[in-house]
Image (cartoon, helix red, strand yellow):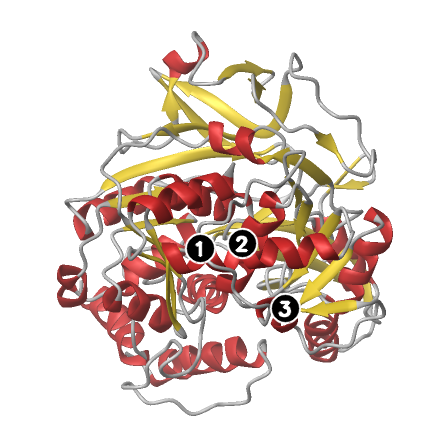
């Protein structure tokens, strides 16, 4: 499947760069040769599942394609995960080989990525089609309280859900998402299918991203609204004019009108596509009319492979090609005939359906889901804090931020508590989870003695 | 802009930096805010926007501007006052 796409790519455009990063470029032909040699190395390990915990995206992509060619299951672990988190994932999901380029000591056998990469390159032309069964990929959800779910997907179903090809082949995409993220896989699949170049930025900061876009003439970018606000907001007119962005894809969180307006004025020649996706159903539909939300007519007929309906203000989807199931059976797998609750609250407004936030109390900070209860636990552990409420606050940069209200114990020094809270957040929470606004109040609003957590966004 | 307002902007910047483990209390208008200067990323910018909004009732980010320097934050409020 995806190795087949690479074969086609290498046959039709062997000299075209497939991967470009700070270290240089890998042409489609060279990528295929590399994948072919990795296949035999991976098969030699006699393991059915390969976990990847890697920073270097280029070698990761080639190794992932090789797992598919070898008929293996691969699971890409977030490279920001701590070694404890990696160990917990391995322990829970079980049996498998861990390939990593991390120096961090792990309490398990690790195959260094460099040793895979050092395998001799076989001559081009030998087929990669040696697998007896199709490879699959395990996508971990971003669960921060409780355990992340591990959804098993088949590669061809993921490909089947890609938005239809809209334009000519040979585009130049920026890889703005990590590959453990659905949207990162979508970009990889689109690049393979459309025989395009993937440019991997040296970092996620503005300067590295702008450098990658400018130096390598990137013309298609798929990223979160937060990424786009940062990029489009910081570009000078002069810098914007030098870019030739043709395709802007937004996903991961709801888009706002002001962002669409900004993007249209910054990149007048670009097509703007908003993708709606869920972990279970994958990419559901894409909206290209430059307005927020989606047309109400989508509720009346199937859109591509999915049907949509609204029940009690919540959006439900039913997909003809959803995931294959959960790896660890921690949750019942949705059946193809099942409607999946998305947790997204929507509202009809004329001929438009608009997103109104999440049903659960999950806070979406720049596309990353934050669970208030986890943050509250940390805050409540700080001496001097009597009660805490964590909620979302609308924010012009990241869509939402984590905010909290505190009730203090009597007689404690507010400044000392604030300092202790800051220290505790830095130590126990990731940057998305850390409260960005802390208010000390006399009494937190309660309903039935439960803290009312709904935020202002 | 009053000296008190200026001091407040600086103290907000100090607090944003402190939240990422950086100690700094003096700033110049030409200081750049992001990785080529104070090192703020999108999350820090989000905090900065929220704190400015709290202190002044408005902030440049919400107004659709994306300040590049400390001076641009200051001039957002001077311009707001002039209007």
Task: Kindly identify which residue carries mark 2.
Answer: A36
Q: Residue at image x 50%, y 53%?
A: A366
Look at discs 1 and 3 and give the one toward the viewer: 1
Give whichever of A264, A10 is nearer the camera: A10
Chain ID for label 2? A
Q: Is residue A91 above or below residue B43?
A: above
Q: Chain of mark 3?
A: A
Q: Chain of mark 1?
A: A
Do the CB atoms of the residues marked 1 and 2 lie less than 8 Å apart? yes
Please name the residue that numbered disc 1 is placed on.
Answer: A124
Q: Which residue is mark 3?
A: A113
Asked if residue A317 is positioned above or below residue A54 in the image, the reply reads above
Q: Identify the secondary structure beneath mark 2.
A: helix
Quarter of the rendering containing residue A21:
bottom left
Mark positioned earlier in the residue sequence (1 or 2): 2
Q: CA distance from mark 1 to mark 2?
A: 8 Å
Q: Is tag 2's residue or tag 3's residue first in the polypeptide sequence?
A: 2
- Name which of mark 1 and mark 3 comes first in the sequence: 3
What is the crowding at mark 3: few (fewer than 14 residues within 10 Å), some, or many (at least 20)?
many
- Find numbered disc 3 in the image and state the secondary structure of the residue it sits on: helix
Whether residue A408 appears in this view of the structure is no
Q: Are marks 1 and 3 on the same chain?
A: yes
């Amino acid at each position: 499947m995806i190795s087949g796409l690479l074969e086609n790519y290498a046959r039709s455009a062997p000299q075209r760069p497939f991967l470009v990063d700070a270290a240089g470029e890998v042409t489609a032909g060279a990528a295929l040769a590399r994948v072919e040699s990795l296949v035999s190395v991976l098969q030699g390990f006699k393991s059915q599942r390969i976990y990847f915990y890697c920073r270097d995206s280029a070698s990761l992509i080639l190794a992932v394609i090789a797992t598919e060619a070898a008929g293996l299951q691969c699971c890409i672990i977030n490279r920001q995960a701590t070694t404890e988190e990696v160990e917990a994932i391995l322990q829970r999901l079980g049996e498998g080989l861990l390939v990593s380029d991390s120096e961090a000591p792990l309490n398990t056998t690790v195959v260094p990525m460099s040793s895979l990469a050092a395998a001799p390159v076989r001559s081009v032309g030998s087929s990669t089609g040696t697998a007896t069964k199709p490879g699959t990929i395990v996508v971990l959800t971003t669960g921060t309280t409780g355990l992340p779910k591990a959804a098993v997907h088949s590669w061809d179903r993921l490909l089947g859900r890609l938005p239809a090809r809209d334009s000519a082949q040979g585009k130049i995409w920026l890889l703005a998402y990590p590959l453990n993220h659905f949207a990162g896989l979508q970009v990889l699949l689109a690049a393979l299918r459309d025989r395009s170049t993937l440019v991997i930025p040296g970092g996620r900061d503005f300067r590295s991203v702008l450098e990658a876009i400018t130096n390598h003439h990137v013309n298609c970018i798929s990223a979160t609204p937060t990424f786009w606000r940062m990029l489009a907001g910081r570009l000078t007119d002069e810098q914007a004019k030098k870019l030739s962005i043709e395709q802007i894809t937004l996903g991961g969180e709801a888009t706002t009108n002001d962002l669409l307006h900004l993007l249209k004025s910054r990149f007048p020649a670009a097509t703007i596509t908003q993708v709606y996706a869920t972990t279970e159903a994958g990419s559901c539909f894409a909206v290209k009319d430059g307005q927020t939300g989606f047309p109400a007519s989508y509720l009346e007929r199937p859109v591509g492979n999915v049907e949509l309906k609204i029940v009690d203000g919540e959006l439900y989807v039913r997909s003809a090609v959803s995931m294959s199931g959960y790896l660890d059976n921690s949750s019942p797998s949705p059946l193809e005939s099942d409607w999946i609750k998305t947790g997204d609250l929507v509202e009809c407004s004329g001929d438009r359906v608009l997103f109104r936030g999440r049903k659960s109390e999950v806070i979406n900070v720049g596309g990353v889901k934050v669970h208030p209860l986890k943050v509250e636990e940390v805050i409540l552990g700080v001496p001097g804090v009597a009660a805490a409420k964590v909620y979302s606050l609308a924010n012009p940069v990241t869509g939402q931020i984590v905010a909290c209200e505190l009730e203090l114990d009597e007689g404690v020094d507010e400044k000392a508590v604030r300092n202790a809270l800051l220290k505790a957040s830095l130590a126990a929470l990731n940057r998305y989870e850390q409260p960005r606004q802390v208010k000390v109040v006399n009494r937190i609003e309660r309903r039935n003695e439960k803290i009312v957590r709904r935020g202002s966004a | 802009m009053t000296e008190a307002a200026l001091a407040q902007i600086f103290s907000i910047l100090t607090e944003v930096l402190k939240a990422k483990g950086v100690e700094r209390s003096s700033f110049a208008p030409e200081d750049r805010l992001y990785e080529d200067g104070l090192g703020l990323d999108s999350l820090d910018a989000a905090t900065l926007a929220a704190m400015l909004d709290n202190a002044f009732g408005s902030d440049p980010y919400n107004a659709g501007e994306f300040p590049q320097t400390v001076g641009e934050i200051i001039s957002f409020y001077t311009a707001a006052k002039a209007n």
